[in-house]
Amino acid sequence: MTGRGTPDRRERVSSAVVAAAFGVSALGAAGFAAVYATGGQTQLEGLTLAVAFAGIAVGLSVWARRLLPTGGYVEEHEPFDSPPADLRLAAEALTGPESPVRRRGLLAMLGLALGALAGAALFPLRSLLPFDRQRPARALRTTPWAAGVRLVRADGTPVRPADVPDGTVLTVFPQGHRSRGDVPAFAVRLDPARFTAPPPGGTVAGVVVYSLLCTHAGCPVALYLQGTARVLCPCHQSTFDLLAGARPVAGPAARPLPGLPITVDVEGYLVATGDFTAPPGAGFWSLR
Amino acid sequence: MVTATRADSARRLAVFLAVLGLAAGPVPRPGYAAPVPDPGDAAPAPSSASQPSPAGPPSPTAPGDGPGPPAAPAPDPVASRGADLYLRTCASCHGPAGEGSQRGPSLVGVGPASVDFQLSTGRMPVDQETRQPPHRRPAFSAADIRALVAYVDSLGGGGPQIPTVGPGDLREGRELFLANCAACHSATGGGATLTNGLVAPSLDRSTPVQVAEAIRVGPGLMPAFPENVLGPEQVDAVAGYVQHLRGGRLDRGGASLGRLGPITEGLVAWVIGLALLVGVVRWLGGRAGR
Amino acid sequence: MITRWLSGRLARSLDDRLRVAPVLRRALAKVFPDHWSFMFGEIALYSFVVLVLTGVFLTLFFEPSTADTVYSGAYAPLDGSRTSAAYASTVRLSFDVRAGLLMRQTHHWSALLFVGAIVLHLLRVFFTGAYRRPREINWLIGVTMLALALFNGFTGYSIPDDLLSGTGLRILYSVTQSIPLVGEWLVFLAAGGEFPTAELVPRMFVSHVLLVPAVLAALIAAHLGILLRQKHSQFPGPGRTENNVVGSRFWPSYTVRTLALFAWVLAVAFALGGLAQINPVWIYGPFDPAQATSPAQPDWYVAWGDGALRLFPAVEFRVFGRLVPSPFLPGVVFGGLTFAGLYLWPFLERRRRRRRDRLAHQLLDPPRAHPARIGFGVGVLALFAVLLAAAADDILARILRLPVLHVLSILRVLALALPVSAGVVAYLVARALRAGGGRGIGELTRSDVRSAMRFGSRAGGVSTGVGDPSPVATAEPAAGSHDAARIELWRDPDGLWRWRYRDAVVVLAASQAYRSRPEAERAAATAYGDLPAREVAPSGGRTGEPAAMRERAGRIAGRAGGYLALAAVALWRGRRARRRPPP
């Protein structure tokens, strides 16, 4: 160790630094209490508390580095192979004449009982499944969209074809099912002359409706690029071409967005004529 | 806590207003506003006097809104100023009568809101052809922008008028912003990446009128939101919430880290937090005699 | 006075009942190796403590429920909105509870530090071969803790029910759902139905605050218990063998050092928590399945999975007419392979080196000693770095002003090319270092590099000195390598026996005293084999230390107390002077 002055002087300086650091820490703690008591402010609270801990940290660090020895000790590290006598005695104790491991038949029955119990213990897991006892594949495949269900906006008002504007998309929901995860769809007005593939759900006066959920991981494809008639997913940048039946044109999505078949009811509002043309959102094993 | 918050927000508001005043101040760019008439571009000035007034009465808007709505009936000096500026700085791309060309789209019927948006955000005029001009300091003074708006409107009517923005409901603004804007501009207002190298810009410099104009016009790839999608009060609410998002007012937790989300947070955790701790450990765990 | 009481009455009364002295004596004398890289695990441990402390505070205010509530409070843009109770209580915690935001942010920052420190610790263990026999169990426990830390980080990030984390949760749901045959059932078991369900937040909450932390605490205890039993490994060096540990004693040196590190972790966590904003859920807004925000990334420690999802091409295929969706390969298979690889690594490597299958290793490898291991490790690290970058591809595209699809293509190429090239470079550098015996990359000579490139003959493997990977040379302290090495024994005035190791470079004192000479001799023989031992006169060196220590400690404590008292008086006076009627 190199340093100015004699070891004794060094030590005095070091202990003064340690004491000062602990003093600063106490001030920080008092500061935190004061900030809290006078109404609190996140940045000051964090700063004072950090100073309080940093004071202790600096003090202890200097203490450890300058006032305490480092290294210079050795401890023996006995090998981990036990003495043969110990091994033999342990084995004998485990498998001695009274040892339960000798009762093979009883052990087998005990194993059977425990196995059965473990199997039975799996059954309450069933309680974690949905209360309505619907099979997952069926639940994932269907949505509340059905023939005659009106398309409504987020605030619940029904939509006429004329309400679907040029130049933007309108997020729509099945009436009465605003907050379900699989229902969000969007309506958009496109020029039918530009279609390169027919929209799967059909069109009413240029209005087409698609599921809002990306077929990759289920994020809402809520970025509509006006003019290009494409929607983009913010999660993994999958892009869908609405003029080509919402075919994926970039990114990790592999299936087109499902369309929603629509028509107009007697009052002139847009209604679905059935469920999405395919299950919405991410794929799953039993998706046909 | 209430007092601290209030004092804090007052201070931030003051800074914010000062910055806003500076940013919105009329700073003409010499390249465009040089008062040298070009004799080669002497196209006949259309009779703008016959055009109707483009906007309603001037409205009370937030301070430092940038250019307000154009003044009622344009007197001759304004009209000729507008024509003059148009011919010198816009006509080369958009055509002498706003009919458009290879280099720029037609301006006939785009409406005052669009023209005011492009000019007041400094996106037009552009130095060179680019796919997406960025938000810059406007090239023209507020008066010149008014004159240009009136002139372009005289080339062909129609299109959205410059909206008047009133105070909006903050809660409704937040809900509408998240439902309609956050997907592209980010819930933080910081903007995000679109495809093909285009971006949805950050809203950090947008005034309420510019926000309202963009909502109605849908500049570039942005969807337009007509009145039957977002009513006037709803536009007011969104514009008000965007002002609330701007600056550091909502960054109660400290440094905003660009509001870019978990990636920058992870970077800070490694570059500051863990680097610091590794440094400490190197110091603490050094061997004796070193 | 306190110290005397502690060592006197309290200790005696405890010992009367528990007989702690023999255990305590050995525990206090435990030797910790002095190398900074051995403290990464401690950073993780102390981050965990910070997480528990701040987390307990948060549970007192957080409401784990998706029930509709109306938020009313200081955050104006949300005042009067209907949101889930989880989201409303998180905003209330941040805006209306004093010091709540500090605790929330400190909790989140410590989570990032926690996982980061685990990764650093894992890298140290990996590159020095510390996972080898007999420490495979602790490696398995460590990898399990890493997995649990990732999972708990994700659930903690998700329970506020905000828009950004809800999107992430939906992605995880979709990835799990993509598993063939059982995926649909798995997600329904975990979430109780189709996303989003009311059960999800309460279930994640129970897992986040009870199940996983309890398992983590148990595993930490096991990890440390095994460490105590097996003792530390150490880097090779003078006086170090396969049968000893050289370093500082637990008490007092290492105790003060590790407490200092604890205070540092607290200081850094609270400084970040107060000064740098993290996860501002009030800006993100409550979760709504029809809304999105962009850019959307998860926390860094799971972002590699998100990056894999972005990089992997749109590949979906059908098996027996059933669909295997596109997130399956990059999400489930890649993640599964990552952890399977981590779990199996010690056994895979051992299988490759059949020759020393059975040997226990207490001496670590210098990283350069195993070029293949370092090359593989660096390659995998490079792959994960590319994946992390891919998770931020949209942000990168914006910074670089490039189309995001170009950035993606570049990253795809990098994901294939960078791991291989980085791995090969690391492999060659390690070989060159091993051949040259230099201290660092800066000291490499051209001939070192040339010899590293020479394969066929074992040219790159022939080495001397520090980098020698051969266990035979290090396991036995051959007399030739310690020219003047010897053991010195002596009897202290109090009748206890001590010994020390001495060679030309170092003098190492035995960490504890022995009651008889044979005991001391046995310990020395365990540590150093049959080195010549001889009795010497007692030396004052280390024995006078405790008295000086006590004196020093007393001085410091006295001075600190004085400053504290001064500060308290000043504060009290200030308060009195400023006392005013309450508003």
Image (spheres, helix red, strand yellow):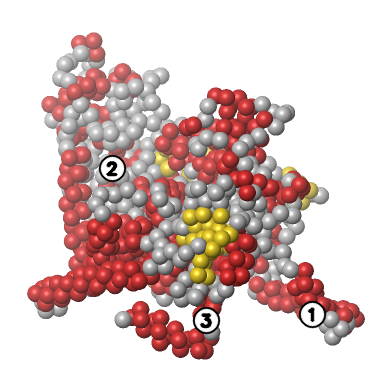
**Residue C297, percent from left and from top:** 49, 50
Crowd band around label 3 with a 10 angstrom C-alpha radius: few (<14), some (14–19), many (20+): few
- Residue highlighted by disc 3: C20
C580 up-or-down from C512: above or below:
below
Query: Could you tell whether C401 is left or right of C330 in the image?
Result: left
Asked if residue B223 can be seen in this view, the reply is: no
- Residue highlighted by disc 2: B205
In percent of the image, x 62 and y 42: which residue is there?
C468
- Tell me the tag on residue C509: none
Distance (Cα) linking label 2 and label 3: 69 Å
**Label 2: chain?**
B
Q: Nearer the viewer, mark 2 or mark 3?
A: 3
In percent of the image, x 73 and y 77: which residue is there?
A121
Query: Could you tell whether A147 is left or right of C395 in the image?
Result: right
| Residue A273 falls in image quadrant | bottom right
Q: Amino acid at mark 3?
A: Val
Q: Amino acid at mark 2?
A: Arg
Element under disc 2: loop
